[in-house]
Image (tube, grey):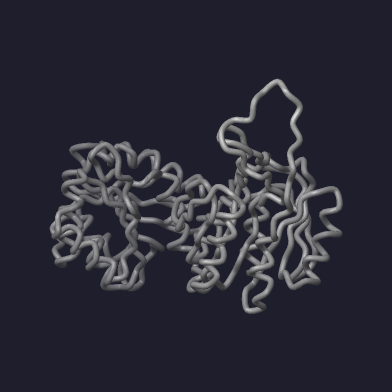
Amino acid sequence: MRRTLEGKLIVLAVTGSIAAVDCVRLAHELRRRGADVQAVMSEAAAGIISPEALTYATGRDTIRTITGHVEHVIYCGDEREADLLLIAPCTANTIGKIACGIDDTPVTTFATTALGSGQPILLSPAMHHSMYRHPAVLKNLEILKEYGISVIPPRIEEGKAKIATIDDIVLWSERAVLGRPLAGKKVLITSGACREPLDDVRLLTTRSTGQMGREIALEAFRLGADVTVVHSGRFPGVRNVSVETAGGMMEAVRAELDLGVDIYISAAAISDYAPDWIAGKIPSGKEQEITLRPLPKIIDLALSNPAITTIGFKLGDDAAVEGRELLRRGASMVVANPPSVMGSPTGTFLIMGDGPDISVSTKEEVAFELCRRL
């Protein structure tokens, strides 16, 4: 695991939601990524989770009250020690208080100070869905966004607006403190396998899991990009466009390019061929001949526009040779790899273009190097 938060100090502010029980694991995960964590909690939060549990999880005494040491100024003032104020979970009550400038708890006092000093603030709402839909709560969230506070979308499940997953909160925290070198860039990624129907029951596909596309999408999001992924899955933090077939992916990519894209990354295992679809189910027990028709290359849509930075992937025994041909055609970078890497997080990946060729051994490293070069 990369220590993406190495050298960062995060204030974890906990309010009185039952989701506070997740904060010990959240603190542990932030520290695993390299962060130092200082917990501060409201009185209501202390009624749900023991302050000693957070002290154990962070390795620092939990702040329960503001003292003469002016803890809020030390961590969130103009000469602050902390890099981020993370309020998780954040109740409707706390959202309303911050929006109105009320600070009658340690958490809201930290928030008032952070807003005044310009410190990055990130909050993760948690409440019942009916509360989350209240017009005043929605309005207050918009006010907070206007103030520059980032709001992690909650999970709408079982009649609740649940706190985001720990992985999502860590991802958004990384985005908040890593400097956003890709801020303002629109990144379009195709990811995963396509599925070409043979009949109403069968289909042709590949063994691609979409893991490469996921790693790249998350890394681009960490670095501040506006990321859209065209695939059949769902990744956190990004805009997901759902497709199944290569034809559907082609149309979705064309539509996104028409809207304007700075960077296109073709990480999908896009079908090279498709069968003619047969209605119903092909009878079993007989030999069948399947005719496959070649499909157009989606990457050509991006290569036709030199203003778009295009990154391609080549899979095969001659992937490096084919990759250099793609570079000659206008791609900025190409990742070449053998078929054995499909479905595995590790392998041999050769990154070519926009700098010296380098070889890395994991898909996470590929994502890091590509986004670093961008």
Residue 198, relative to residue 75: is it above or below? above
Who's the residue at 50% across and 62% down the image?
A: 227
Q: Position of residue 236 (x, y in %)?
A: 45, 51
Q: Residue furthest top?
A: 285
At x 45%, y 63%, the residue is: 177
In the picture, measured across the screen, residue 208 lies left or right of residue 361, that is: left
Is residue 342 rendered to the left or right of residue 55? right
Could you tell me if residue 55 is visible in this image?
no
Quadrant location of the N terminus?
A: top right
Q: In front: 74, or 261? A: 261
Q: Nearer the viewer, residue 121 or 261?
A: 261
Front residue of this view, candidates 141 and 325? 325
Tell me the residue at 20%/55% (across/down).
Answer: 106
Q: Quadrant of residue 176?
A: bottom left
Across and down, in percent, residue 243 comes to: 52, 51
Q: Quadrant of residue 10?
A: bottom left
Q: Residue at x 78, y 65 (%)?
A: 326
Count of numbered tags: 0
Q: Is residue 91 visible?
A: yes
Residue 365's spot in the image, x, y percent? 66, 53
Left or right: 51, with 344 as reference point: left
Work out which quarter of the rendered image holds the C terminus and state it: bottom right
Give the vertical position of 71 relative to 235 (above or below): below
Residue 356 in picture, x, y percent from top left = 79, 67
Most extreme residue toward the bottom, as rendered? 307
As displayed, is residue 10 above or below residue 31?
Answer: below
For residue 2, side relative to residue 356 (left or right):
left
